[in-house]
Image (spheres, helix red, strand yellow):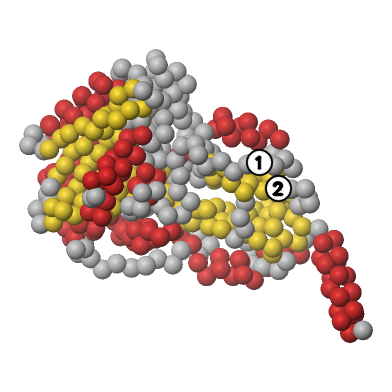
Amino acid sequence: MKGVTLLILSFLFLVYTAAIPKYYYSVNIDGLGFSSLQTLKNSTTGLDWWLELGEELLLQGESRTSASLLAQGLSFEQLGQVSPSDRLYVARKMCKPLVGDLLSSSEVLLQRHGFLVFKSSQAFTSNNTSTHFGLWEFQPNVELVKQAKNLPIASFSLPSDPISNLVNLVDDVRWFNDVKTLSTFNRYSLGTGIKSAENWIISQIKTINPKIEVSTQQFTVKSTAAFNIIAKITGTQRPNEWYVVGAHYDSISEKSTTSAPGAEDNGSGTAGVLEMLRIFTANPPAATVFFILYSGEEQGLYGSAAHAKSLVSAGTRSQLKFAMIMDMVGFVQGTTVKALVETYSQYKPFVDLYLQTATEYVPNLQMYTSYSPFGSDHMSYLTNNMPSVLAIDADYDKYPAYHKTTDLPNLVVPAMAKAILKLNVAVLAKLLLQN
């Protein structure tokens, strides 16, 4: 009899809880801090799950959840009631036309930093095979993008004076001049104009250091020959320890065969590699650094994949200690410079290094992190079990001229690129000094 009573009570409890209305909430967690954020996630009344996306936390909870949020002094918005038919998905919205088609029968709950969370009564199939588009089913209690101000930060104790000297060498005027020149070329991988860009880049490298070792790596993009450009500075003490500083130099637009200026995407990263090459040429590194400009990124990461696979084939993968990738580093909305760094969670120590380095050398740079990497050349190394981090401006998904003929130098912000370049120079310098 006691067992029957417990069964009935359990059934009644399930019926009761199923009948409680549930709601979606968007909570502002900008600069909330690690401890307060943990309290929000673990102690909010009636909370079912959360999803962290930079400055916002998406929640599902009961009506009493709003009172609990108010009691914590939080700013939030109730986004509507949960329906039993709701299916939740996350999309990576590098490719806006594809996302637009997807959302025609859906409702966006939250979008920031290239991620988009939406609900739909329609079922979608996960798709992570495209270079610039990803879709997967929602998973609760996940940090898609983390604001550094909401993180406990690990500390590093490494020499700092030599690093300051290198950081101060970053020249955003010189960087911007390179962006302007790169934008005069049509750098479409399947066109003829990219050869002129390749020749110009090689000439710039030779101007920076006439004695530098420069090579090209040929591969095929959709039956068209394409080339990576590789400049090598051999380490003065540890020549068999390798680092990569890379960016794709190809571009694309809605009229690629006639015009693809690609100032932000990715003249900004290409100019960044050249700027870092200047700095480390004048200050020879202890370990070997390859400065690589990839082609074929827009068609599917062909160039970086070719380089990563060449390391695997040659049996030298273990010599690559880190690949530092830049893509779209020159745009910001507003006046606060913001950067996102992303990689797999197994490489968290590198992310911690970026965060600590930013506080030391670029304190005005607002940092975000993600362990859901996607859509750029870091993926070629990560998928081949080599450590890599992408640095990208945190407003890249808001860039108005993405993959358009209007992606011109007047839209890029030198101060944004300067902040990321100072960060990258300091991070690379630390890595070179730590062994």
The amino acid sitting under disc 1 is Phe
Image position, residue 407 (x, y; %): 41, 26
Q: Is residue 344 visible?
A: yes
In this rendering, the answer to whether 288 lies above or below 130 is below
Residue at 16% across, 50% down: 288
In this rendering, the answer to whether 167 lies above or below 4 is above
Residue at 87% across, 81% down: 3
User: In terms of secondary structure, where does tag 1 sit?
Assistant: loop
Which quarter of the image is occupied by the N terminus? bottom right
The residue at the far bottom in this view is 2
Image position, residue 336 (x, y; %): 43, 47
Image position, residue 86 (x, y; %): 74, 48
The residue at the far right in this view is 1
Nearer to the camera, 73 or 256: 256
On screen, residue 13 versus residue 187, left or right, reads right
Nearer to the camera, 282 or 88: 88
Q: Quadrant of residue 5?
A: bottom right
On screen, residue 276 versus residue 42, left or right, reads left
Residue at 50% across, 59% down: 31
Residue at 76% across, 52% down: 82
The amino acid sitting under disc 2 is Arg
Q: Nearer the viewer, mark 1 or mark 2?
A: 1
Q: Residues within 10 Å of mark 1 (few under 14, many from 20)?
A: some
Nearer to the camera, 255 or 227: 227
Q: How many marks?
A: 2
The residue singled out by tag 2 in the image is 87
Q: Residues within 10 Å of mark 2 (few under 14, many from 20)?
A: some
* C-alpha span from label 1 to label 2: 9 Å
The residue singled out by tag 1 in the image is 124
**Residues at circles 1 and 2 in contact by the CB criterion of under 8 Å:** yes
Could you tell which of marks 1 and 2 lies nearer the N-terminus? 2
User: In terms of secondary structure, where does tag 2 sit?
Assistant: strand
